[in-house]
Amino acid sequence: MSKKKLVFSGVQPTGNLHLGNYLGALKNFVSLQKEMNCIYCVVDLHAMTTFQKPQALKDNVLETVASFLATGLDPNKSIIFKQSAVPGHTELAWILNCVSRIGWLNRMTQFKDKAGSDKEKASVGLYIYPNLMAADILLYKATHVPVGADQKQHLELSRDIAQKFNNDFDCKDFFPLPQPLIPKNVSRVMSLRDGTKKMSKSEDSDYSRINLKDTADEISKKVKKAKSDSEEIPDNLKILEKKPEALNLLNIYSEISKENLEKVLNEMSGKEYSFLKMKLTELLISEITPVGKEIKKLLSDRAHLEQILKKGKEKANIIAEENLKIVREKVGLI
Ligand code: TYM
């Protein structure tokens, strides 16, 4: 098991999956399932680190599964399950809490961003969130982790924790050091309202993001309102890189059209942003609205989604228990 390539990734069920999640993570999940064994987890325990209404959490778990399926994940190829259904995640997280160092956690920028100015009021769960994430990955001895760039620092921490565990318990190579798989151009899809901030579920304005469930009309309105630039589209990357909003729109266009950015610039340079916006709207509508419709359709059969989670849990639990038994032995719990 340990030498084999294995993919693991997770998505928080906090509602409103958006274009950033889709281009930064979900599309990669789908292409990886063709070549490797993959495990994809709806990380409800991570979502709880900021308060969630209980019913909303339950609903959002199913909506996340529906989004996985609608983007092309196949439960016969990939294991799809809910984090809290496999108790090994929290058990290993506790063991890793005792391996991870406070100094390491203090460096995590996502905690600083999410906790805001009053850190004393943040939950302890939010602070140790990266240790649980390391447990998710290491519980399956995953070797590859597809994520957006915002998760890179957490992945580095997972590697440090794996290495320290292997050293402390004298078991070189026991936990593989997981490699992040981060897409090149869309590692960080930015907000449509501010090209210096990442597109996110928690941003107040819905105009900052394209949600997977948006209708054609909503997509069209959001792209029309998106911030761009007062000058015409430049002819070279050096100038474009100084215009974050324009770069973001062109990057999204390049990714969905599958044309590289230089080629897109060649075609678009000298044109008004309204032209790019019109083309981008067409592309986004044809890429995203079928996904949204499928999510809505899948959500009308909750029993089917629950059944997928149940089967996924059974498969995930077998791998988790096998690995956890060895971990318990190594640390002296059995
Ligand atoms: P989450 O739920 O915030 O996001 C899910 C995935 O979407 C990516 N992503 C983005 N990519 C590009 N541009 C954006 N604007 C953007 N916004 C989000 C994220 O990088 C992520 O890949 N901590 C994780 C969940 C997690 C996890 C794990 C991931 C828990 N355990 C183990 C990998 C392995 C998170 O909060 O993702």
Image (cartoon, rainbow, N blue to C red):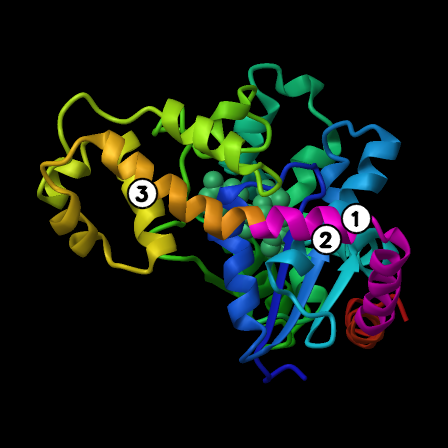
Task: State if disc 1 and disc 2 touch (CB < 8 Å).
Answer: yes
User: Is residue 309 located in the magenta-colored stretch of the structure?
Assistant: yes
Circle 3 sits in a helix, a strand or a loop, which is it? helix
Circle 1 is placed at which residue position?
299
Give residue 129's position: percent from left, percent from top.
67, 42
Residue 283 vertical placement versus 324 (above, below): above
Q: Residue at x 45, y 26 (%)?
A: 221
User: Is residue 26 located in the magenta-colored stretch of the structure?
Assistant: no
Q: Nearer the viewer, mark 3 or mark 1?
A: 3
The numbered mark, 3 or 1, whose residue comes first in the sequence reads 3
Could you tell me the amino acid type at mark 2? Ala
Q: Nearer the viewer, mark 2 or mark 3?
A: 3
The CA span between labels 3 and 1 is 31 Å
Could you tell me the amino acid type at mark 3? Lys
Asked if one can make out residue 151 in the rendered structure from this viewpoint, the answer is no
**Disc 2: CA contacts within 10 A as few (<14), some (14-19) or many (>=20):** many
Give residue 220's position: percent from left, percent from top.
44, 32
